[in-house]
Image (cartoon, rainbow, N blue to C red):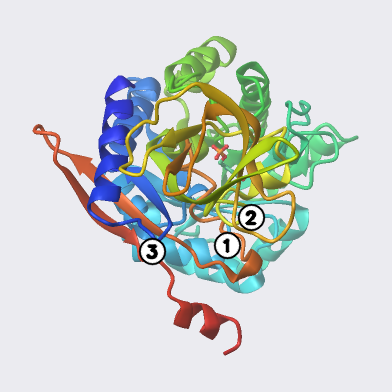
């Protein structure tokens, strides 16, 4: 990870020097393209098992950016999509249909038809959706799309309610522990020989690895039960979802993919027996550590004895951090006007965004070298769930996102991942 820290430092310096960000573009996102590739390779290495076919997909909602999906695609990683927009982005990135999985609790009739026509795998969320599929799948001719059902093993939540998807009353999937539910699922599979997958996703951030593994074990045991009842290997593939938590406290990649794979190997050895193919859908952990938001300090002021740096990164780019600060704290670095780490004794201060509401703070009472006009702040670990979850407050435009690569001599080369949104585009999408 130290390479990642060094590259990040070089990139921030170069972004300022090369004018990607400055007085007129006071906020930008930077993405370490080699960091993304390294993370993808760690994922492959952690799950690689002789005789087991593993298809890793990236949960597109974590960074719905075509060039990111292209880079991941070059590393053999497909796309997990949950809306027509995400599917269109994955297709624009050239992700082949065989590497796309459609999960969503609200697929329309048209989306189901399109996925089937394209041969894209999909996981039905509930019995009503299975009933819709019954009408679309022709008896006697198996669909090109691998089809499955998402089950909620109801193993409980993690430390963050909003990202825990396997609680007793979660809106996602078919609740497996409700009265008679498991028998219903077994019969549903026996009635539909074309159902060949089982899907579960226990949550996203805040869910302990052991709890995630318990959810996966429930799906595995159900697959075994279905296959025994069918007298054949009807369920061929288990989709274990994503959810590896990211450590937002330091630059350590902890837990690592290997840690989770080890927990799974211990808790569900049969998953790696070779009798099942695996699909994964990691989002946050694939991108978070490779991204940083760089924002200029426009003014430094003081109120009630508290220094406040007013920057250009607020709720529009760090939405969860600003709206639910206790749950989603971010590390903030103080940089000087050239983008170098700023020296100075720690001073308790607030780091504010540009938006017109008092809560628009990305850090409260944080000890940092005293920020001044023209300095920069860097919001770390923002590669996931920041660049594509823009919040349109105050009509602030979506900032530019730039991929970077650092060569052996330390020279930084940038490529445009997403252009900064122009004011004309903003006006147009506002009904102008
Ligand atoms: C959000 C989501 C993921 C990705 O979760 P991460 O925490 O970003 O890894 C995977 N699968 C499903 C179904 C999801 O909803």
For ligand 1, tell me if the residue under mark 2 lies within 8 Å. no
Q: Which residue is mark 1?
A: 83
Q: Is label 2 in contact with label 3 (beta carbons under 8 Å)?
A: no
Furthest-top residue in this view: 266
Residue shown at 50% from the left, 41% from the top: 283
* Alpha-carbon span between mark 1 and mark 2: 7 Å
Q: Quadrant of residue 197?
A: top right
Counting from the top left corner in percent of width and height, residue 374 is at 42, 49
Q: Quadrant of residue 24?
A: bottom left
Sequence-wise, the earlier of marks 2 and 3 is 3
Sequence-wise, the earlier of marks 3 and 1 is 1
Q: Which residue is mark 2?
A: 104
Counting from the top left corner in percent of width and height, residue 121 is at 49, 53
Counting from the top left corner in percent of width and height, residue 358 is at 74, 52
Viewer-side residue, 116 vs 43: 43
Left/right placement of residue 356 relative to residue 57 reads: right
Q: Is label 1 in contact with label 2 (beta carbons under 8 Å)?
A: yes
The image quadrant in which ligand 1 is located: top right
Residue shown at 47% from the left, 48% from the top: 373
Identify the secondary structure beneath mark 2: loop
Q: Which residue is mark 3?
A: 91
Question: For residue 312, which numbered disc appears in the image?
Answer: none
């Amino acid at each position: 990870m130290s390479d990642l820290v060094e590259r990040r430092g070089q990139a921030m310096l170069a972004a300022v020097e090369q004018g990607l960000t400055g007085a007129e573009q006071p906020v930008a996102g930077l993405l370490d393209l080699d960091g993304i590739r390294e993370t993808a390779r760690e994922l492959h290495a952690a799950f690689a098992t002789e005789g087991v076919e593993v298809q890793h997909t990236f949960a597109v909602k974590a960074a719905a950016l075509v060039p990111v999906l292209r880079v991941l695609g070059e590393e053999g990683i497909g796309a997990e999509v949950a809306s027509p927009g995400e599917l269109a982005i994955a297709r624009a990135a050239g992700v082949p249909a065989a590497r796309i999985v459609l999960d969503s609790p609200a697929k329309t009739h048209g989306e189901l038809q399109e996925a089937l026509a394209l041969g894209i795998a999909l996981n039905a969320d509930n019995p009503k959706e299975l009933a819709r599929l019954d009408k679309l799948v022709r008896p006697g001719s198996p669909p090109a799309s691998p089809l499955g059902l998402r089950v909620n093993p109801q193993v409980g939540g993690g430390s963050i309610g909003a990202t825990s998807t396997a609680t007793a009353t979660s809106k996602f999937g078919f609740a497996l522990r409700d009265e008679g539910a498991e028998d219903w699922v077994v019969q549903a599979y026996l009635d539909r020989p074309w159902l060949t997958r089982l899907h579960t996703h226990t949550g996203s951030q805040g869910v302990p690895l052991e709890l995630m593994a318990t959810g996966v074990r429930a799906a595995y045991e159900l697959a075994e039960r279905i296959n025994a009842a069918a007298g054949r290997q009807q369920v061929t593939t288990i989709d274990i979802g994503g959810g590896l938590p990211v450590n937002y406290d330091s630059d350590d990649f902890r837990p690592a993919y290997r840690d989770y794979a080890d927990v799974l190997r211990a808790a569900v050895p049969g998953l790696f027996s070779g009798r099942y193919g695996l699909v994964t859908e990691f989002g946050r952990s694939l991108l978070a550590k490779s991204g940083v938001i760089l924002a200029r300090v426009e003014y430094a002021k003081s109120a009630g004895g508290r220094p406040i740096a007013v920057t250009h990164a607020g709720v529009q780019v760090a939405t969860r951090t600003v709206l639910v600060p206790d749950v989603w704290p971010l590390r903030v670095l103080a940089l000087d006007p050239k983008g170098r780490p700023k020296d100075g004794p720690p001073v308790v201060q607030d780091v504010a965004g540009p938006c017109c509401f008092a809560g628009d703070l990305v850090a409260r009472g944080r000890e940092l070298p005293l920020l001044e006009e023209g300095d920069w702040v860097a919001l770390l670990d923002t590669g996931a769930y920041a660049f594509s979850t823009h919040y349109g407050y105050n009509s602030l435009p979506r900032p530019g996102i730039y991929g970077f690569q650092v060569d052996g001599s330390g020279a930084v080369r940038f490529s445009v991942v997403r252009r900064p949104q122009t004011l004309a585009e903003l006006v147009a999408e506002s009904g102008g």
